[in-house]
Image: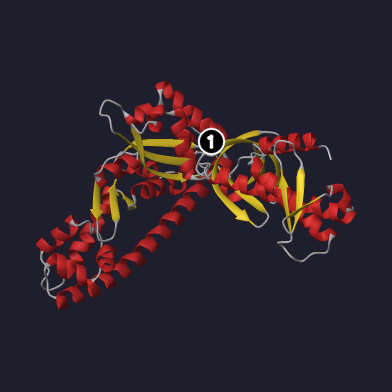
Amino acid sequence: MNTAEMMRILDSIARDRKIDKQLLIRDLERSMVSAARKHFNSLDTEEFRCELDTASGRMTLYRHGQPMDLAPEALGRIAAQTFKQVMIQGFRDDERQSLLAEFSGRVGEIVSGQVQRYDGGAMVVTIDRAEAFMPRSEQIPGEQFQAGDRVRCMVLDVRDVGSQVKIVLSRAHPDFIKRLFEIEVPEVAEKIIEIKAMAREPGHRTKLAVASVDSKVDPVGACVGVRGSRIKVIVEELSGEKIDIVRWNDSSQILIGNALKPAEVQEISLCFELGRATVVVRDDQLSLAIGKRGQNVRLAARLTGWDVDILTPEEYQKGLDIMSQTLLSVPGVTEVHVDRLAALGMVSVFDIEEVGAEVLVNELEIDAETAKKTIEITSARAKEVAVQQQKDKEQAERTRREQEEAARRLLESGASPLAAPGEGAADVSAEDQARADKILGA
């Protein structure tokens, strides 16, 4: 046996696989003991012992504490096969423990790897000497990589699963964006700027609330960078995902107003009993506040921790009027009680029904019987309002469909809605065309 060559191989394995060399030596000694027990058909685990001289690379086998003048190759083919199997298994276990120790300390860290393939929807990525995977749920929707592409991702979890270490990666986790900001914005890495809250819908939009511990540093401006240089890098890394950066405020009302930007908010009413914020915006700001498919208000709610309702001034006032009329019909309830409930953020009969009688007793200082009667009356009124709202919604939908159908027929016929019978497409004015386009939402 070439002992010098064996020691060089051990050094190479220890260096390439980042395994402690002493662990490899221990595996070799254990393998030699297993081979000797196989050769001598021994069941006694204490009968044999092996020592490897790290300087010379010479192995010495002991039996009952006495050295044996026996070369490893003299043990025979079967024992040699046992030696090989035990040695390989030992090396694999050591490598697994090394990977586990290394990547367990890198959870939450951004790493760069090379895409290998897709396996059942999961993306397999090689990072250094390890093979990791990114489940479909942790991928950004719409992103697709090719084999050989470089990809940046965050180490989400490291699991010891039997004979292997599973390294779970993520690009969809909110902390991935936090780590990107720490890389691109030095003030975030240095804790001068703190990301206080964040809400994300991967691949679509993210909202961050930031604050600065230094009054001289503008947290929003620092994160955006000169002419958007910093935020642009992050958006490109996220394949165009939109990022809204808002200023954090300890006041929930101000924070909710900031979170709903770019919409302009007129009034915010907070109901701490329900954890609900009623936000009033102008008609022309309603769609902006709600966002595409409700995305803006949904992210704002998650960012602030409040259940956010968006209302127009007419809807808000109508809800207050119905609540006021309903409450004042209850004996023992006065205008003062109604005003106090409105100040507590309860702006509709639905809110009164939801808070329950106990809150009314505590907040309005009325007796339990009056509170119970109030809840009964508001519950009945809430059902009526819900039915009417559903009818109004259905009517509005029918009207919209009728207008679209009328506009479609108008455009198909080429006739003006103001033209005399028999007049054709040549008589359609630009004003009529614009009216039809507006109806269709063109």
Residue drawn at 24 percent across, 51 percent down:
269
Amino acid bearing label 1:
Leu
Q: Is residue 303 left or right of residue 135?
A: left
Residue 209 x %, y % = 35, 39
Residue 373 x %, y % = 19, 76
Of residues 252 and 400, which is closer to you in this image?
252
Identify residue for label 1: 238
Secondary structure under the numbered disc 1 in the rendered image: loop
Residue 398 x %, y % = 46, 56
Residue 377 to residue 417: above or below = below
Of residues 322 and 181, which is closer to you in this image?
181
Looking at the image, the residue that sits furthest to the top is 226
Q: Quadrant of the N terminus?
A: top right
Residue 417 in view, yes or no:
no
Label 1 crowd bin: few (<14), some (14–19), many (20+), radius 10 Å: many
Q: Give the quarter of the image for residue 370.
A: bottom left
Of residues 238 and 167, which is closer to you in this image?
167
Residue 178 to residue 355: above or below = above
Residue 204 in view, yes or no:
yes
